[in-house]
Amino acid sequence: MKYISTRGNAPELSFEEAMLTGLARDGGLYVPETIPTLSREEIAALAGKSYEEAAFTVMRPFVGDAFSDEEFKGIIARAYANFRHEARAPLVQLAPNHYLLELFHGPTLAFKDFAMQLIGQLFQFSLARRNERVTIVGATSGDTGSAAIEAFRGLDNVDVFILFPHGRVSPIQRKQMTTPTDSNVHALALDGDFDDCQARLKDMFNDFEFRDGVKLAGVNSINWARVLAQVVYYFTSAVSLGAPDRKVSFTVPTGNFGDIFAGYIAKKMGLPIERLVIATNQNDILHRTMESGAYTKEGVTPSISPSMDIQVSSNFERALFDAYGRDGGAVAQLMEELKDGAFAISQGAMETLRDHFASGRASEEETTATIAGAFTSCGEVLCPHSAVGVKVANAYLGDVPMVTLATAHPAKFPDAVETAMGARPALPPHMADMMDKDERVTRVPNDLGALETLIKERIAQR
């Protein structure tokens, strides 16, 4: 299995090399050269299997000879050992033919744990075997950072630096990043929004002297292994609802497009997905793009669903790569145009995108009303991101079962939930003292040179 860049001008890599590299040296994102498929019989055989067994079946074709079967099974088992639900990703029913996929039973109460716990184990195994050390730098709008810190804290072969937008994450999200005491993890509050964090991260990867000097690696959803891990729960939930003999649709609250792109990969692998619905909040660049064919940045407006407050959706580049017939030059040209704030998608590429994706948007008022409505109608407490998904999904309900991804535990966004339903959601008992813990955080300017200097100084102190 080989991996190629979406911009067509970087060396082909193995799974392990692509995982440890993150962003390609031409600025592109790695994708598999070909997408392996599962037969109807193989998909049907997932019924009744544990999540770990299903994960092995779904992901094994993508890893090539990077790990033996037993090594990979051990990595998967360790990745999900600390989840607090035996099903890992349980389904609950909201209404006739509408289901919620609870993805918040991991260590940091967010869907990012499914990918990050796996990638932490993958990195640890690979680096120990190679006797290497890397520096991980990540950008987060809230949940990625805490999931990364939880996955890599205390590991011998990794230093972790997480950039998050100062004042633009929830208090719980911030505390999850700033309270760990392990010396190899560092929370950096950047003056700017998430797009600024993501831009500085990409700048570091494109500064090859710095990148090579600190052995930079990435665990944002630009890392293919992150996307791969998220493919699994599309299969487990669809099989629970009758796949492959029954089609299933999914609605995905998304900002950076990684989670819904995982659904696209599941569909390409043979999972009978009827529709993939992109759900956006008021920062609705993806919905506007699907309607107009023009990807135009308009600035970020803070919302009650802050993890979706994004205007540069990195993983959309992977979808564009396929929509343009895997023409890396065409994608590189679009990304160059984006530096000026916008690009237009060709008619043919838009037709391809619309063949796979639909979209919708939820305002702040609609999100709040959806939280209240779900609690009244079925007793389900939604985080604001999950509520965006449920609101958008309601417009697409029909004969085909709809699964909306619940991306975070409601207690991570207590103010928004309390405003909507009049009661404050409690943190799980194992996190009850989170808000009382001391914080370790460094506020940093939106300046590449200052960030690189700080990172090199911190590494030198280890």
Image: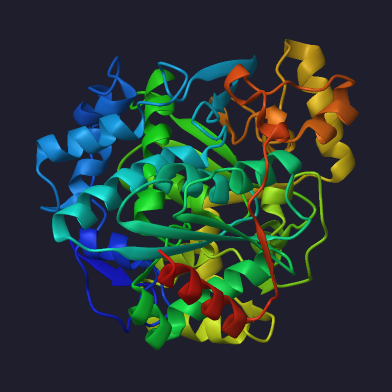
Give the quadrant of the N terminus.
Answer: bottom left
In this rendering, would 423 be left or right of 147? right
> For the point 55% across and 49% down, which residue is it?
144
Q: Is residue 369 rendered to the left or right of residue 13?
A: right
Does 336 appear above or below 159?
below
The image position of residue 211, as x and y in percent, is 39, 79
The image position of residue 193, as x and y in percent, is 73, 65
User: Which quadrant would residue 245 be assigned to in this image?
Assistant: top left
Image quadrant occupied by the C terminus: bottom left
User: What residue is at 36 percent from the left and 30 percent from the top?
Assistant: 80
In this image, 366 relative to 256: left or right?
A: right
Looking at this view, is 179 or 402 the one in front?
Answer: 179
Above-or-below relation of 234 to 30: above
**Left or right: where does residue 148 sit relative to residue 272?**
right
**Can you see residue 119?**
yes
- The residue at the point 34 percent across, 35 percent down is 79
Q: Residue furthest front?
A: 461
Residue 36 x, y percent position in the rendering: 22, 50
Pick the front one: 239 or 283: 283
Q: Quadrant of residue 323?
A: bottom left
- Residue shown at the point (52%, 30%) measured from the top left: 103
Q: How is the image coloured?
A: rainbow
- Residue 253 visible, this angle: no
User: Is 174 located above or below residue 191 in the figure?
Assistant: above
Q: Position of residue 58 (x, y in %)?
A: 27, 38
